[in-house]
Image (cartoon, helix red, strand yellow):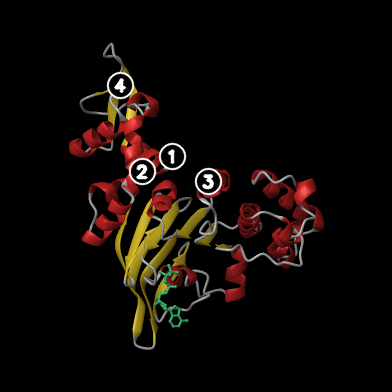
Amino acid sequence: MIKFEHITKRYGDTEVVSDVSLTVAPHTVTVVVGTSGSGKTTLIRMVNRLVEPTSGMIRIDGEDNRSVPAFELRRRIGYAIQGHGLFPHRTVAQNIATVPTLLGWDKARISAKVEELLTLFQLDPDFFGARYPHELSGGQQQRVGVARALAAEPNLLLMDEPFGALDPIIRAKAQDDLLAIQKHFGTTIILVTHDMEEAFRLADKIAVMDKGKVVQYASPAEMLVRPATPFVEALIGASERPFRQLAIETTGDAVEPGDAEGAPIPATLNQREALSELLWSGRTALPVAAADGRIIGRVSLDNLVRRAARPG
Ligand SMILES: Nc1ncnc2c1ncn2[C@@H]1O[C@H](COP(=O)(O)OP(=O)(O)OP(=O)(O)O)[C@@H](O)[C@H]1O
């Protein structure tokens, strides 16, 4: 668990992060969004102490993050940035092995880890391990960057616009990979983006920043139903386009197993109408009925929001 307690950062007279308090649950993805200059990067860099707060404290699993030396903290916390930051004169395998080598892992363990990660990221280890970064495409380099950040099996991964430089199709694939990998390792992820669609797609919780403050910290579904400020509403509005995609699929396509209370939604209704029913009912899930009235499962707000946010 990561706890930000009244975190403030000032540069001279300018407060770039103002009194931020929030708690990130373990094994979840928290996405920090907001306009350019709102303090997103500064906020996450205080977690691994690339930036020191002016006041406040960050606790990682209960411990003040200043209780261990900064270099040790950074070995424990994965960090992936836009443009991957790979070492150009080291092979892909050597890049991924950076932190495990610093930690003194034995050779066999390191090469097993490199092989596991390359395989997970769908890069053939025999082919890619010995290549240099410049021999890879942008998307492949990005995957190696994330693999490197995960190499020492961190419980916590910080990501700053990791997919910012990728074209939309490769970006969607990278997001899918990230979610699969997050499930596989149970990593807690804090990711910065300025892309609301990416936030809806990846987040368990979204923190919206505006001028150094976190103006809302909520699940995508909660944010959709109850945007806290006109600024949040505007951000969501800007990403309304994907919700139109829901209009072309039926509720039947989004059925999940399980029960729910409330008036059943016909499976033939389109997903946008189902979303509207859910929002109006104030429920997080409703039962779904087949043409013969039989209940075939449930449809949930979270599921529809995720479907809305995926690329068309
Ligand atoms: N080392 C520094 N010295 C002075 N000002 C800084 C420093 N680092 C960041 N800032 C300022 O703090 C503010 C917040 O920057 P930050 O990079 O955290 O924003 P951001 O939300 O991540 O923006 P972007 O989306 O453009 O990357 C900006 O106005 C920036 O100019």
For mark 3, does the 10 Å Cα neighbourhood hold few (<14), some (14 to 19), or many (20 or more) residues? few
Tag 3 near tag 1, CB within 8 Å:
no
Which numbered circle lies on residue 242? 2
Which numbered circle lies on residue 268? 4
- Residue 153 in view: no
Earlier-in-chain disc, 3 versus 4: 3
Tag nearer the camera, 1 or 4: 1
Give the farthest residue toward the top. Answer: 292
The amino acid sitting under disc 4 is Thr
Element carrying mark 4: loop
The answer to which quarter of the image holds residue 249 is top left
Tag 3 near tag 4, CB within 8 Å:
no
The amino acid sitting under disc 1 is Gly
Tag nearer the camera, 3 or 4: 3
Residue 273, horizontal then vertical, whole percent: 25, 32
For mark 1, does the 10 Å Cα neighbourhood hold few (<14), some (14 to 19), or many (20 or more) residues? few
Earlier-in-chain disc, 1 versus 4: 4
- Locate residue 3 relative to residue 163 in the image: left or right: left
Element carrying mark 3: helix
Closer-to-camera residue (64/119): 119
The answer to which quarter of the image holds residue 282 is top left
Earlier-in-chain disc, 1 versus 2: 2
